Image (cartoon, rainbow, N blue to C red):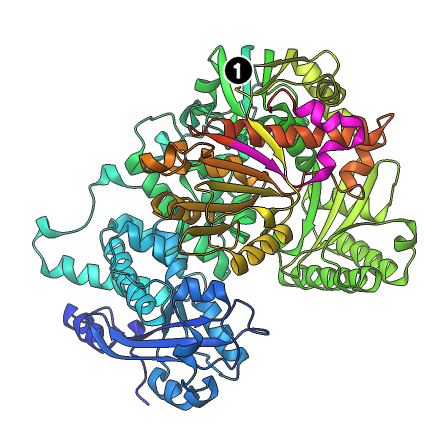
Amino acid sequence: MTQQPSLFDIQPNESSAFVSVLADRRQFIALDIEATGLNPEKEKVIEIAVVKFNDEKILDTYQTFVNPQKEIPKEVVLLTGIKDSDVAKAPLLSDLKDHLKNFIGDLPIVGHFIEFDINFLNFHGYDIKNKQLDTCELARIILPNEDSYNLEMLGHQFHIPHENAHRALDDTLACIELLKILREKLQTAPQQLWEQIKNILQKGNYSWKEEFLFINSKIKSMRTDAPLEHLCIAPLEHLCIAPLEHLCIAPKSSNPSPISQPLIQKLISFPYNTDDADPNNLLHAPSYYFDQNKFQKCLKKDTFSEIEIFFFLKLIFFQYQFETQNTDPNNIPSRSNLRLYNKEKHLWSKVCHNFESLSQTEFWAGKKNKAEISCSHNLIYEFLKEKNSDYIKAKELIINNPDAFIKYLFLNLIENLTLNKLESCDLEKNLHDKLTMLFGLLGIFYEENFANVKSEMILELQHFNTKKWQEITRLIQDITEHFTLTEKLTENFNKIIEINFEKYLYSITLTEQGDIILKIYSKNINNEIQKIKNSFEKTILQSNFPLTENENEYLKSILGNNAQCIYKNNIAKIDFEMIENIELIDFKNSQTDFFILTTSDANVKNIYNQLLKTIDFKDNLLLGQNQNGNMKKLQNTWKENEILNRILICKYEYFPQFINNENPSSVQTHCLPAEVSTKEGNTSLSLIIHKIPFDNLKSPIYKIWGEKFANSFINFSIPRTTLQIKNALFHFSKLNANKKILCADERVTKYNGIVMENLKGMIN
């Protein structure tokens, strides 16, 4: 079998002709499968395509349906167009093994999320060990701020022909075209950028390493052979790394002067996802901003893990993109210019600012010199956890959407311990092994005490008295005694060793992905909230909708009785109707677009599967949160679809984001024909309340805060519930169409009518 030629065969003194020869010899396989579902333990392959190609052209293709020996689910038929009749006489996957093995050989395999395809095939008896090159991962490096890295969405952006998305051969060909475009973008990067790329790549192994180096060698050969004016190297002033004197972070002196912050007149706080504030002028939490000094320290390490190489390459392109597009010399890169996923979010903590470093930048000085500042709620959250309370002083704090502020305040004051989060720290191998062992023991502990219930479970005294927990405690003590840990991790480990039920509540969670999360809740959140009273002379809670006495009292009980509650919008009431259940709605003949709000991912999935069986897809478009792709894809599908009735199923917190992350006009009703829109009783938009969002009475937050109220259900749970409903109704009210609310949860009429009393300012 011919061995794939390697870039490392090139000697420094060899001519550019060698690069050309190598390009002709390099071959790859593009692979894609379609399946009856995502879980290889339960689902089967229904189509597979492989394409052999080199740097210039397609060399060979193979595509076939595969008989799954089971019925293809309706949602897969709708997605792929593949029906049971198409696969009835197709070969079994096992029958294709030898042919595919010979076709693929030992060539690198390219694909979009290729790990899924390879793992699926290997689970079903294949043994593919070839190098995997994920074009999604490469796109996330070179294009660090895309709303979506879905192959279909990237295809739209770059005008890649892709008529039959979610068909195996079309997806492989689209993937090859995407790879070509990404290579072209790499070739236009300036040489100084390449010096940084090579510096990162030489410190570890990475799947795309050889491809990066080959493209760099190709650029060098072009530079050797081509006239100067044809070079792709950008002028010096466009480089992504500015000279030291232009860096946004001032060097620290050996004796830093005391922090002196001006008194702001008004600090106006908004939720992160809002259309009420200009995102370009919103001051975010320090951890939202990129710290160049910290990044340079990270790059001085001798070796990098594969995820670090990926992340640092992404940051190089992130910086370059910011420097070439930014027009404000005092501005600094931030998360608004960067899309982060999974472990990247933990690695970001290595390169982001804190209050101390951000307060020394010209960016911060420019923001703080204004009499009125708009900021995100996250800035306040981080400030409340900051030991130094001198960073922010203001005469007046105005909190917009105080219900959302409180909800996420609780979540931000929780300490979460996960293996992924700890792995993002600089860990020596022995410490990494110990932490892996620790979370393995926590997994066994969870299984022994809570079976396989995937939920958050509160830890009680009897759990800490078990032999397994004693083993966990001894291991934590061993780690704290023999390794140098961060101050925060040491503090959290001590809280676990010295169990204190008066100060803390402890919980453990097994996620759907099988990860273990250990959480520590402070029972003394009042200490942090007291900072609001100390740092701001006046606090105003500004709601988007009218508040009842029940809701007012709840907000003030958390944020202080001296806080003033106001609301700023006049909202037209929306017609409200109780229905027995969703199944009674005639989606086919309603001439309406629907938003169905529910309380959990499981409910979304159940409703989605239920409607799959009953609605007519000639007349309806059905979308579900996490069922049809990410938010951007759902927004585009909703906006571009010509079907009369569109249905979106989602959780309450998702709904405002779905509207606010896109121009509201893009989610409004279709332009109905005149003869339809003028029919008596026609409704253009309906909001369906499937379940009202009551707190789980066993949740840690309810247990901690509910106990502080004379009647925890009436004074804590009900106002939290109605505020969340009213927030959804407020965003629904902004859509310019005939509107109606349908409620399928009879609990809204119970509890002495308090829920309906709280809602009556917004419904008829």
| Magenta stretch contains residue 656 | no
Is residue 753 highlighted in magenta? yes
Per the image, label 1 sits on a secondary structure element best described as loop
Mark 1 lies on residue: 570
| Residue range corresponding to the magenta coloring | 740-759
Residue 325 x/y as whole percent:
29, 35
For badge 1, the amino acid type reads Asn
Which residue occupies the foreground of this view, 627 or 101?
627
For the C terminus, the quadrant is: top right
Residue 640 appears left or right of 308: left
665 and 519: which is toward the camera: 665
Q: Which quarter of the figure has residue 711?
A: top right
Can residue 302 be seen here? The reply is: no
Q: Is residue 406 left or right of residue 7?
A: right
Residue 576, percent from left and from top: 60, 30
The answer to whether 89 is drawn above or below residue 550 in the figure is below
